[in-house]
Image (cartoon, rainbow, N blue to C red):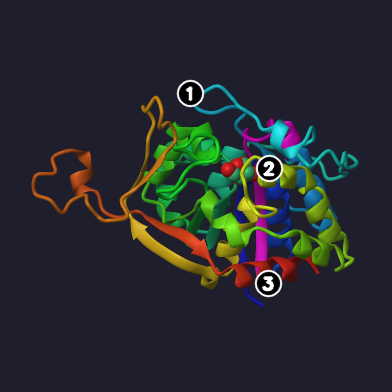
C-alpha cells in the first residue's frame, strides 16, 4: 500500500503526544521523522515525550533535537498547563529509543529534499525549526506537498493573549517567515479544537472504555490540561489542539468551514504580538487606494475555521482503539 510520508515538528506536550500517536496509528501514513522545538516544553523534555509516545506505538521513528529557543524572543514554556513533565505529571519511564544524531533543521531539509512533493509537514509547536530550515534552504518551501500548522486564531480571541495563540505568539518572527515562505500552508487555529470539538466527560469515559493502551495514554496524559481547559479557558471539555490539526492532515474532509485568505503575523504589536491577521474579507489588493505592502499579496493560507466534530472525534477514536 502506498503510504503518505509525514514529518512532524513538535514541542511535545500532552496534546502533541496524541497527535504523534495518531500519525503512527493511521493506516496510510509513514512518519519519516519527528523534529523537536522549544515551546511548551524545553527541547529535552519534548524529545523524551515524543520518544516515549513513539515507543508506545511500537515504532522507531527518529526524533531530532532542534532549536532550544525562539529566534528573538525569550522562551516561555507551559509546564503550568501540561504538568511538570508535559504529560500531565504521569512521569512515564525513560524511553529506550534514543534521540537521533543530527539537528532537527538538517533533518527537515534532508527529508524534504529526499521526498520532493511527496511529504506532508505537520507543525505542532512554535515555528522556529521550520523557519530556520527555510532560511537555510529556501527552495524547500515549494517541495512540501502540504504544511498543516497548528497555530493561530482566525479572527477570534487568542489563548495566551486576546490577540494571539501560543505557537505563533511564542516565536512570531519564525511564524512570519513561514507564512511568507510560499509553502502550501494550511492553518488550524486553536478555535478549531474548542466548543463542540472538545471531548466531554462522557466521551472521555467512553474512550477509557476502549481499554487500549493508546486510549488510556491519550486521556490520562491530558487530564491535567483538561482542568485548565474547563476552568481557565471555559471550554466544555478536553481541547486537543494538536490532534485536531493532525486530523486535518490525515483527512481534510473533517474540515467543515475553511477559506483561503491572505494571512500574516504581527511581530511589532505591543498588544498584538503573534496575532495571525486573517484577511477573511479579501480587503487587500481590492481597493485602489490600498498603498501598503498588503496590496500586492495574494491569499497564502488555507484556514480551517471549524471541524465536523463527529468526524473529528471518529478519526481520533479510530487511532485510539
Ligand atoms: O495553543 C495550543 C498549542 O500550544 C498546542 O500546540 C499546544 O501543544 C501548545 O504547544
Ligand atoms: Ca504543541
Q: Quadrant of the C terminus?
A: bottom right
Given contact means CB atoms under 8 Å apart, are the residues at marks 2 and 1 in contact? no
Q: Was residue 40 drawn as part of the magenta stretch in this picture?
A: yes
Q: Quadrant of ligand 1?
A: top right
* Residue at mark 2: 231
CB of residue at label 1: within 8 Å of ligand 1? no
Can you tell which mark lies on residue 314? 3
Q: For the residues marked 2 and 3, what is the alpha-carbon distance in whole angstroms?
A: 26 Å
* Residue at mark 1: 72
Label 3 residue SS: helix
Residue 298 placement, left or right of 59? left
Residue 201 or 299: which is nearer the viewer? 201
Can you tell which mark lies on residue 305? none
Q: Position of residue 155 (x, y in %)?
A: 40, 48
Q: Position of residue 225 (x, y in %)?
A: 72, 43
Q: Was residue 318 drawn as part of the magenta stretch in this picture?
A: no
Measuring 57% from the left and 38% from the top, which residue is drawn there? 105
Residue 109 or 294: which is nearer the viewer? 294
- Which of disc 3 and disc 1 is earlier in sequence? 1
Can residue 153 be seen here? yes
Label 2 residue SS: helix
Q: For the residues marked 1 and 3, what is the alpha-carbon distance in whole angstroms?
A: 40 Å
Q: Residues within 10 Å of mark 1 (few under 14, many from 20)?
A: few
Q: Based on the displayed image, in which of its 4 quarters is residue 250 positioned?
A: bottom right
- Depth check, mark 2 against mark 1: the one in front is 2
- Which of disc 3 and disc 2 is earlier in sequence? 2
The span picked out in magenta is 28-46
Residue 189 or 18: which is nearer the viewer? 189
Measuring 51% from the left and 42% from the top, which residue is drawn there? 130
- Which of disc 1 and disc 2 is earlier in sequence? 1
Amino acid at each position: 500500500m502506498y503510504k503518505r510520508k509525514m514529518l512532524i515538528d513538535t514541542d511535545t506536550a500532552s496534546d502533541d503526544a496524541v497527535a504523534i500517536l495518531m500519525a503512527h496509528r493511521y493506516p496510510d501514513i509513514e512518519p519519516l521523522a519527528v523534529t523537536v522545538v522549544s515551546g511548551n516544553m524545553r527541547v529535552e523534555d519534548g524529545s523524551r515525550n515524543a520518544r516515549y509516545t513513539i515507543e508506545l506505538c511500537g515504532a522507531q521513528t527518529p526524533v531530532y533535537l532542534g532549536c532550544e529557543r525562539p529566534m528573538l524572543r525569550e522562551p516561555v514554556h507551559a509546564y503550568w498547563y501540561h504538568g511538570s513533565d508535559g504529560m500531565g505529571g504521569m512521569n512515564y519511564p525513560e524511553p529506550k529509543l534514543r534521540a537521533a544524531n543530527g539537528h532537527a533543521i538538517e533533518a527537515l531539509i534532508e527529508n524534504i529534499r529526499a521526498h520532493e512533493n511527496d511529504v506532508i509537514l505537520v507543525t505542532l509547536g512554535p515555528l522556529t525549526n521550520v523557519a530556520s530550515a527555510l532560511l537555510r534552504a529556501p527552495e524547500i518551501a515549494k517541495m512540501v506537498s502540504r504544511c498543516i500548522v497548528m497555530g493561530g486564531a482566525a479572527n477570534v480571541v487568542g489563548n495566551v493573549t486576546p490577540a494571539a495563540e501560543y505557537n505563533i505568539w511564542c516565536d512570531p518572527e519564525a511564524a512570519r517567515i513561514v507564512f511568507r515562505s510560499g509553502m502550501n500552508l494550511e492553518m488550524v487555529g486553536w478555535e478549531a479544537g474548542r466548543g463542540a470539538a472538545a471531548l466531554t466527560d462522557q466521551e472521555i469515559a467512553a474512550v477509557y472504555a476502549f481499554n487500549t493502551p493508546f486510549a488510556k495514554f491519550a486521556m490520562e496524559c491530558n487530564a491535567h490540561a483538561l482542568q485548565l481547559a474547563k476552568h481557565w479557558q471555559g471550554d466544555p471539555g478536553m481541547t486537543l489542539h494538536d490532534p485536531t490539526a493532525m486530523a486535518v492532515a490525515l483527512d481534510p474532509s473533517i474540515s467543515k468551514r475553511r477559506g483561503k485568505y491572505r494571512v500574516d503575523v504581527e511581530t511589532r504589536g505591543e498588544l498584538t504580538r503573534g496575532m495571525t491577521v486573517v484577511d477573511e474579507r479579501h480587503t487587500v489588493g481590492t481597493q485602489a487606494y490600498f498603498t501598503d505592502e498588503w496590496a500586492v499579496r495574494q491569499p497564502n493560507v488555507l484556514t480551517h475555521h471549524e471541524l465536523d466534530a463527529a468526524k473529528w472525534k471518529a478519526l481520533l477514536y479510530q487511532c485510539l482503539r
